[in-house]
Amino acid sequence: MRMKSRERTISYWGCVPLAVFLVCVLLVFAAKGLAGSSLRETPRNILGGFGIVSIGGFLVWVNAWYKDYRRRHGYPVHRRMTALVKGVSIAVFVFVILTEIGAQGFGHRPEHVVEKHGMKMVAVVSSFLDETVNYYEYQNALFYGKQLGYEWYGSGGGDPLARDPVPEPIKWKFYDYAGALIDENPEE
């Protein structure tokens, strides 16, 4: 009996990493919905890489399972059907890789942990057409919390916090943890 359960566990090896990945994604969504916490850039990239590996492992397992299933039940393994399953698996894997590379490449936003107005914050730089830095409550190395302010630096496409010296923002607004206004730029 013990050997049979071990064989069953081994026979589902391709599902385990995918299940762990899906549980991690659900936990991230639960943290966002329940606590208002967002996953930071580096953990998000690591989770995406783990997703690629787990989906790839799952697709390899599907191919091996299909071949084994056909042999165990006495069905001949047809070359065309095997080629179709492999081709679909390869196409899905390439699509997943390209999607993740695109998401990480175009969605990359540099982060800096800074202290402003006596609060530790995560500064997230968005610089596609305009240079904007959004400041969020620092929670830990994995998550950041609600938005506490922003700085707008005008048109551009770089990281203003990485420049030496850091330029003066054109507009800014900051709030405390309770949501009360702390500081904003003077009226022009």
Image (tube, rainbow, N blue to C red):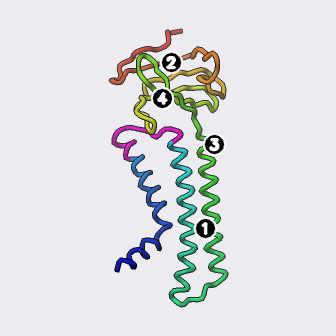
Mark found first going from the N terminus, 1 or 4: 1
Q: Is residue 98 above or below residue 105?
A: below
Q: Position of residue 124 (x, y in %)?
A: 53, 30
Disc on res. 5: none
For this view, does 114 lie left or right of residue 105?
A: left
Left-right relation of 56 to 138: right
Give the amino acid type for the residue marked by disc 3 in the picture: Gly
- CA separation, marks 1 and 4? 39 Å
Q: Which residues are magenta?
A: 30-42
Residue type of the residue flagged with mark 1 = Ser
Q: Residues within 10 Å of mark 3 (few under 14, many from 20)?
A: few
Secondary structure at badge 1 equals: helix
The residue pinned by badge 3 equals: 105
Q: Residue at coordinates 53% horizontally, 76% vertically from top-left?
A: 65
Q: Residue at x 42, y 46 (%)?
A: 28
Mark 4–mark 3 contact, CB under 8 Å?
A: no
Badge nearest the viewer, 2 or 4: 4
Q: Tell me the amino acid under the disc marked 4.
A: Val
> Is the residue 120 above or below the residue 29 in the image?
above
- Residue at image coords 42%, 30%: 138
Q: Quadrant of residue 33?
A: top left
Identify which residue, 3 or 82, lies in the foreground: 3
Name the residue nearer the viewer: 59 or 33: 59
1 or 2: tag closer to the N-terminus: 1
x and y percentages locating residue 23 in the rendered image: 41, 55
Q: Nearer the viewer, mark 4 or mark 3?
A: 4
Circle nearer the N terminus (2, 3):
3
